[in-house]
């Protein structure tokens, strides 16, 4: 059977490189890189008022993100060889990777085969005793009974909530509608295609904006970013019901790291992360990524960036990706950069709490796991004017649900970094689907 995967962007690079520096030897690392490659005059993000301008990011001039310990440089073949030798011989330089192009994880095409896809058991056989098999069968039967009882309770509850026109189904299933918290005082950075700053539902809100795309302001000409910001931080009382936003009192940090066409480079993403950390944002939401092929390892640069962010009290939450066609039994690996172990990877579920047909899974043996799930099918939220609202699907829509819920926990408990991660996953609603597909379960708001 020919699978319709041609519309999925293939991995692409820009020709630049990301150089990971030892965070305790950043200046030494820059000096070693300069000595070995001849590159001079490194610009530093710390030297700019809030963040390097888009023109700086788009140029071939070397740039260092000080909060992350990463340099973005242009290298010819000889310089690249010299840099790789320097990595092998100096503890101040850790690794070099090509800079990738990333995309807004777009609204997938939902195929008319239903969302509930049966799991095919492994055909692997083992030699075990009859007594062991009987005990295993009894244990499985008990587990199945428990799951069915739990799902019946969930189904009954959803049936009573679905008719509630005041809240979207996503806010109901994640218990946001009954939470007493609003994200007050919490800075939430959404790195995406920007935001429609003229949208009437956001009048009077605290919004800090920054564009990392040359020639484009934060004003969203795509819609994707406005939709994600709406879900994470939308109004408590929108002009038109239902309410769609989670952390309605959070401070919005809108970083445009993707163009109005929906694409951007790693350098801009890292620039947005650096800006968010420097601005004191404990939560970064990224509904973006690049396709990962089976067997492809996660980025060591992004993994270290995520670890360093957690150490500084910032949790990065990212979309798992929409490459899968579960109707055909095809599950793709979690996208870059969500596949990094230290980035919270979010899968999408339907209103029946089943994995969405397009949602990627934790299929890789080394990293690339799903950590948590959230509503991601038929999600209603804000859109650029004059359309105002739109209903779309994707792990992009699931991710801001989790980011907004993280803001509620951050407000209520003061948790940051790894502890915030733990609270989100520990309090998730366990689902019957495999952890490969839904992680620890459905994100739940603190009450």
Image: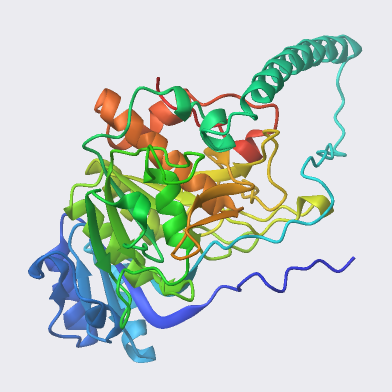
Q: Which picture quadrant has residue 409?
A: top left
Residue 127: % across, % down = 87, 25
Q: Residue at x 57, y 51 (%)?
A: 395
Colour style of the rendered protein structure: rainbow
State the residue in front, 94 or 400.
Answer: 400
Q: Residue 12: x percent and y percent?
A: 52, 77
Residue found 31% across the figure and 83% down from its top = 215
- Residue 100 visible at all: yes
Relative to 97, does residue 340 appear above or below in the rendering?
A: above
Q: Using residue 357 as the reference point, say whether residue 443 is left or right of it.
A: left
Q: Residue at x 68, y 45 (%)?
A: 356
Q: Position of residue 410 (x, y in %)?
A: 29, 31
Question: In this rendering, is residue 304 above or below 27?
Answer: above
Q: Is residue 344 visible to the viewer in this orientation of the structure? A: no
Quadrant containing the C terminus is top left
**Residue at the farthest front position:** 239
In the image, residue 78 sits, relative to residue 159, either above or below, namely below
In this rendering, position of residue 111 left or right of residue 400:
right
**Residue 292 percent across, percent down from the top left:** 58, 62
Which of the pair 120/211 is nearer the observer?
211
């Amino acid at each position: 059977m020919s699978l319709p995967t041609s519309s999925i962007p293939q991995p692409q690079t820009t020709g630049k490189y990301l150089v990971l520096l030892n965070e305790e030897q950043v200046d030494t690392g820059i000096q070693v890189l300069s000595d070995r490659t001849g590159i001079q005059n490194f610009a530093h993000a710390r030297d700019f008022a809030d963040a390097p301008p888009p023109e700086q990011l788009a140029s071939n001039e070397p740039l260092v993100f000080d909060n992350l310990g990463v340099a973005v440089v242009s290298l010819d073949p000889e310089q690249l060889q010299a840099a790789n030798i320097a990595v092998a011989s100096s503890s101040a330089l850790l690794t070099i990777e090509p800079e990738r192009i990333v995309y807004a994880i777009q609204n997938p095409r939902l195929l008319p085969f239903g969302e509930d896809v049966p799991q095919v058991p492994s055909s692997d056989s083992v030699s075990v005793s009859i007594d062991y098999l009987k005990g295993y069968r009894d244990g499985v039967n008990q587990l199945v009974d428990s799951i069915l009882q739990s799902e019946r309770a969930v189904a009954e509850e959803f049936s009573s909530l679905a008719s509630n026109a005041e809240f979207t189904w996503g806010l109901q299933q994640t218990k946001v509608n009954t939470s007493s918290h609003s994200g007050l005082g919490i800075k939430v950075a959404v790195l995406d295609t920007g935001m429609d700053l003229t949208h009437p539902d956001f009048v009077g809100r605290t919004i800090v904006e920054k564009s990392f795309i040359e020639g484009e302001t934060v004003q969203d000409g795509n819609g994707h970013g406005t939709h994600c910001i709406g879900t994470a931080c939308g109004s408590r009382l929108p002009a038109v019901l239902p309410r769609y936003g989670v952390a309605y009192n959070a401070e919005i940090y809108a970083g445009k790291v993707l163009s109005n066409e929906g694409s951007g480079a790693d350098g801009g993403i890292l620039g947005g992360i650096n800006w968010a950390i420097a601005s004191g944002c404990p939560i970064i939401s990224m509904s973006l990524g690049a396709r990962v092929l089976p067997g492809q390892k996660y980025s060591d640069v992004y993994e270290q960036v995520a670890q360093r962010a957690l150490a500084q009290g910032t949790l990065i939450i990212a979309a798992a990706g929409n490459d899968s066609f579960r109707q055909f039994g095809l599950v793709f690996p979690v996208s870059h950069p969500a596949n990094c172990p230290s980035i919270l990877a979010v899968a999408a579920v339907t209103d029946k709490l089943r994995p969405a047909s397009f949602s990627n899974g934790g299929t890789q043996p080394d990293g690339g796991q799903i950590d948590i799930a959230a509503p991601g099918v038929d999600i209603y939220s804000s859109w650029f004017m004059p359309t105002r609202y739109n209903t779309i699907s994707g792990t992009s829509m699931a991710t801001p649900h989790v980011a907004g819920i993280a803001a509620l926990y951050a407000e209520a408990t003061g948790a940051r970094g790894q502890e915030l991660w733990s609270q989100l996953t520990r309090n998730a609603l366990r689902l019957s689907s495999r952890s490969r597909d839904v992680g620890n379960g459905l994100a739940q708001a603190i009450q």
